[in-house]
Amino acid sequence: MKDKLKNYLEKNKESAIDLISRLIEIPTVNPPGENYENMVCFLEKECRKIGLSTKKHITPRHVLDKFGIKGGSARISLVADLDAGANKTFHVNSHYDVVPATDKWKTDPFKAIVKGNKIYGRGSEDMKGNIASVLFALKALKDCRIKPRINIQLSFTPDEEIGGRTGLGYLVSKGLVRADYAMSEGYSGNYISTGNKGVLWAEIEVIGKSAHGSMPYKGVNSFERMNMLVKELEKLKTKILKRKTRYNMRNAIFKSPSFVMGGLLEGGVKVNVVPGLTKFSIDRRLIPEESIETAKKEIKDVVKKFNARYKDSKVNVKFVSQGSPAISRKDSAFFKIAGDSIKSVTGKKANFSVMPGATDMRYFIWKGVPALGYSASGGEKWHGDDEFVCIGSLIDTARVFALIMSRLS
């Protein structure tokens, strides 16, 4: 069976290249969320070609309002099923939205360009390559007359790039998808992800007092106060970075939490005005041993002490997004089949590791579903200029998914 699938996928790889090219050329840029209807219409046709039944789900307006989603397309998710008459279901999720492209691309980011073993285009690696690989895997199983022994369910969802709460998060919360085992994007090659760090995003607002630039003593410079606060937060950062997780990570540096300030930064109105308001962001990533509540308290404690020391200014903290660390419950049979499939394709033992970045896989993990992450890869230039995916990885990833689908029962 392995050789049959391998030969089929290699022989027909042009169809996978064509598929990912057509996906790239539907610019599903988020924010604001463009061309979602076109993408779902295209994916529905592709799913039906290989015998899957489909159903669309639109995230309601009140849910979008709750999470501050404004403008763009309707938030449409597509769920596609292959019923094998089994008691259990293997679910594979893919998000179809992509981040915006800058003007620094060497090629048109929304025109697929094939150069050697690479396909360039926005979303090629994150994560339209996976969409192509999963659909190609199912087509291979169908054409090779290999019937899965487990029900297969696919979901194609929006808004992962802005947190996923109005995409897969909504489907899972409403019970609109089912999964006894699940996979989504993750590592590649012989690495497979078993979860991710937690995420806490904060907005810090420093309020001073505006004044004329020629008379700064009449004001309180919020920018300078922000710099003083940052120095205090740097002390917290130093303390945090000394912590290490006991979980396996692909790189040793990933074993510590992270604390990034200034991803968003704004303030001031004019060169000759003492700034009365300055804002900056904090991106805090938590190792599995940490909790969201403790991470919040550490930041709030620094701010509380700062406000007590400098009473002529005011610092406010707003936590705008949060997600606890997500570590998959281990299922020995599922993990072994996934690991064996990766070894069959790569020739290397599978390395199960936690990722530093969050994916939509966490929505299944939080529900207790055994879930793993695996992806077609390029240069790990996710969100970067001149993003690409390797054709070889595209085909190998299809082989991995096809083997897992055929072996699970």
Image (spheres, rainbow, N blue to C red):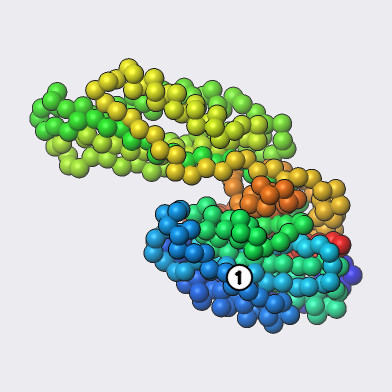
Which percent across, then down, holds residue 309?
32, 17
**Residue 170 occupies which quadrant of the picture?**
bottom right
Front-most of 155 and 389? 155
Quarter that holds the N terminus = bottom right
The residue that appears at 54% across and 22% down in the rendered structure is: 239
Tell me what residue is drawn at x 82 percent, y 48 percent.
331
Q: Residue furthest top?
A: 309
Q: Which residue is mark 1?
A: 78
Placement of 197 over or under 400, stated as above or below: above
Q: Is residue 149 left or right of residue 265?
A: right
Q: Residue at x 61, y 75 (%)?
A: 43
Image coords of residue 8 (percent x, y): 80, 75
Quadrant in the rendering for residue 374 = bottom right
Q: How many marks?
A: 1
Q: Position of residue 334 (x, y in %)?
A: 82, 53
* Amino acid on which disc 1 is placed: Leu
Q: Picture quarter containing residue 390? A: bottom right
Name the secondary structure under disc 1.
Answer: strand
Is residue 153 among what the camera can see?
yes
Location of residue 140 in the rendering, given as x and y in whole percent from the top left corner? 78, 75
Of residues 198 and 191, the one drawn nearer to the viewer in this rendering: 198
